[in-house]
Amino acid sequence: MIFFNKDNFSIRTMQESDIDKILDNYREQRWEKPREVIESYFAKQNSKELFMFIAEYQNDAAGYTVLYPNAQYGPFANKNIPEISDLIVFMKYQRKGIGKLILDEAEKKAFALGGKVSLGVGLHNGYGPAQKIYIKRGYIPDGTGVWYNNAPLEPYADCKNDDELILFLVKEPRANFAGI
């Protein structure tokens, strides 16, 4: 299914041929992603457990995101609130508006499924650009504080500023916080 198509660019569902393209792009920028994870996304898309949004640019997988119809982790788990996960735009395709278009389509689907959409974002500076994007798009903290290893972090508890230190955000349809 194609969600968006213009010139040499489209947002569409994942195809099996995307698996190798995605893994090649990860290797090219020296990131690790197990093949099993990408293959499981494809299998779960086919069994309707999740939705994959692939950004295709000139016959390459420029980026993707995953939308779970029911949040898998954090404060929204198993509450029938859709969750956006694993938003990736590969470095060679960044600064072209691809991430915005991927999120536009994922949010449209999420809002069609439920009244709001959730996501978790890491807190170290590697997530800085994502944090800014989400806030500009109207996502706000859910109020449960910081989570570590899929559990709320107690006040004054020790933690490591790694990919498991997460702040959960939520967005309602047509959220507009420009005047705050």
Image: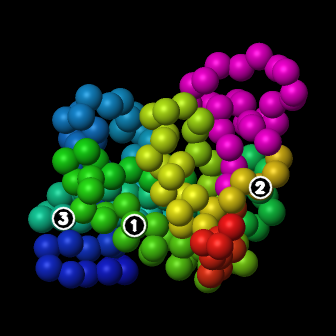
Three-letter code, disc 1: Lys
Q: Which mark is residue 142?
A: 2
Q: Residues within 10 Å of mark 2 (few under 14, many from 20)?
A: some
- Identity of the residue furthest to the right in this view: 155
| Residue 19 placement (x, y as % from top left) | 29, 50
Q: CA distance from mark 1 to mark 3?
A: 14 Å
Circle 1/circle 3 CB separation < 8 Å: no
> In the rendered structure, does residue 151 fall within the stretch colored magenta?
yes
| Mark 1 lies on residue | 100
In the displayed structure image, the side of residue 69 where residue 7 appears, left or right = left
Q: CA distance from mark 1 to mark 2?
A: 22 Å
Circle 2/circle 3 CB separation < 8 Å: no
Q: Nearer the viewer, residue 120 or 58?
A: 120
Residue 95 in the image: above or below residue 2: above
The residues colored magenta run 145-169
Q: Nearer the viewer, residue 2 or 87?
A: 87
Q: Residue at x 72, y 78 (%)?
A: 115
Closer to the N terminus: mark 1 or mark 3?
3
| Mark 3 lies on residue | 57
Q: Residues within 10 Å of mark 3 (few under 14, many from 20)?
A: some
Please tell me in which quadrant of the rendered image residue 61 appears: bottom left
Q: Residue at x 79, y 35 (%)?
A: 151
Residue 60 in the image: above or below residue 156: below
> In the rendered structure, does residue 128 fall within the stretch colored magenta?
no
Q: CA distance from mark 2 to mark 3?
A: 34 Å
Q: Secondary structure at mark 2?
A: strand
Q: Secondary structure at mark 1?
A: helix
Residue 12 in the image: above or below residue 6: above
Please tell me in which quadrant of the rendered image residue 111 appears: bottom right
* Image quadrant in which the C terminus is located: bottom right
